[in-house]
Image (tube, rainbow, N blue to C red):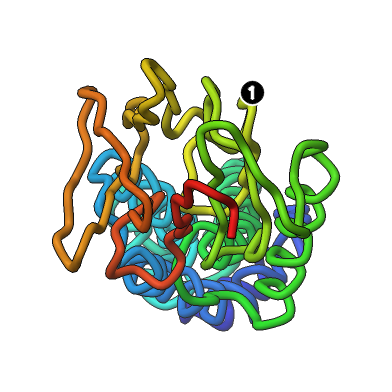
Amino acid sequence: MNSFQFWAHMQSYAQMGRLWWYTFAALPAMIIAGGTYPLMAFALRRKIAAPMVFFWLLVASIPTLLVFPSFYVSTNLESALGQVSFTLPARPQDFPLPDVRQLGASLDTLALYGIIGAALTVIVLIAGSLVGDVPVASPMVQQISQSITKAMTKAMNPRRSTGSLSGQHGVLKVIQGSASGSQYAVRNATIGKQDADILITDSMVSRRHARLEVSGGVARIIDDGSTNGTFVVRAGQEYELGNTAFDLQAGDTIYLGPPAIPTAVALVYERNGA
């Protein structure tokens, strides 16, 4: 009994609802799922937060783990059946009907896992385009993501200004990022993607990224446990902030995310709003 006869017999007697998966879908699904992991690794190549990188690489491996069993059955039938101590009979008529239906139910379950893996492949590819520094799925998805980011920043930040702005303790002017051109008065405030006084929704920005503090006429900035870090560049010198307040001077450039990464948000501190 060869592979063709086996699948023909299963189609006739096993009452399988997902036989189509083995005949033409498992192989292309495995190729695409197998490429998901290296594509995600490439998208995350500039990320510095190890926990986030580990999480997304783990997620990217799930489609392959789900698709592989059914792919293995479709391409190595005898070997796969041998793993469960099943030997193909010499003739179809030697294949008992109860065994046919029991095996068919098991193969249907494997096919279902494969279908779920294929669906997750699409989700992981889209996720890679959103969290990575390069588009993994399509430029259109990345463009839509960037448009949403800009719209969220504009809609959610009522204190955002694109005109001339002055503040008692200076202003922050965004020179790089989706909110480029925006200005914010320096005050005691939090900076972040959510639940913050100054909302900046770029992908490099954490939910609570940094804090501004004003005391004795001096403006200071503190990293608030962000994922990608907060940095200050002064006269060509780069400073990575921790949980200690850093005194700001006019002309300092604050980076939400490493300065070397193009997707980092850059804000210039100005005393007079000019």
Q: What residue does disc 1 label?
A: 195
Q: Residue at x 65, y 38 (%)?
A: 199
Q: Residue at x 53, y 26 (%)?
A: 190
Residue type at numbered disc 1: Asp
Q: Position of residue 156 (x, y in %)?
A: 80, 38
Q: Is residue 109 above or below residue 28?
A: above
Q: Is residue 244 above or below residue 126?
A: above
Label 1 crowd (10 A; few <14 / some 14-19 / many >=20) = few
Q: Residue at x 27, y 46 (%)?
A: 49
Instruction: Give the residue at the far top of this rendering.
Output: 215
Tell whether 221 sits left or right of 242: right
Q: Position of residue 94 (x, y in %)?
A: 52, 61
**Relative depth, front residue between 193 and 108:** 193
Residue 99 seen from this side: no
- Secondary element under disc 1, as helix, strand or loop, is loop
Tell whether 3 sits left or right of 219: right
Tell whether 227 sits left or right of 22: left
Q: Position of residue 162 (x, y in %)?
A: 76, 58
User: Quarter of the image containing the C terminus?
Assistant: bottom right
Q: Residue at x 43, y 21 (%)?
A: 214
Residue 140 image-quadrant placement: bottom right
Q: Position of residue 259 (x, y in %)?
A: 30, 63
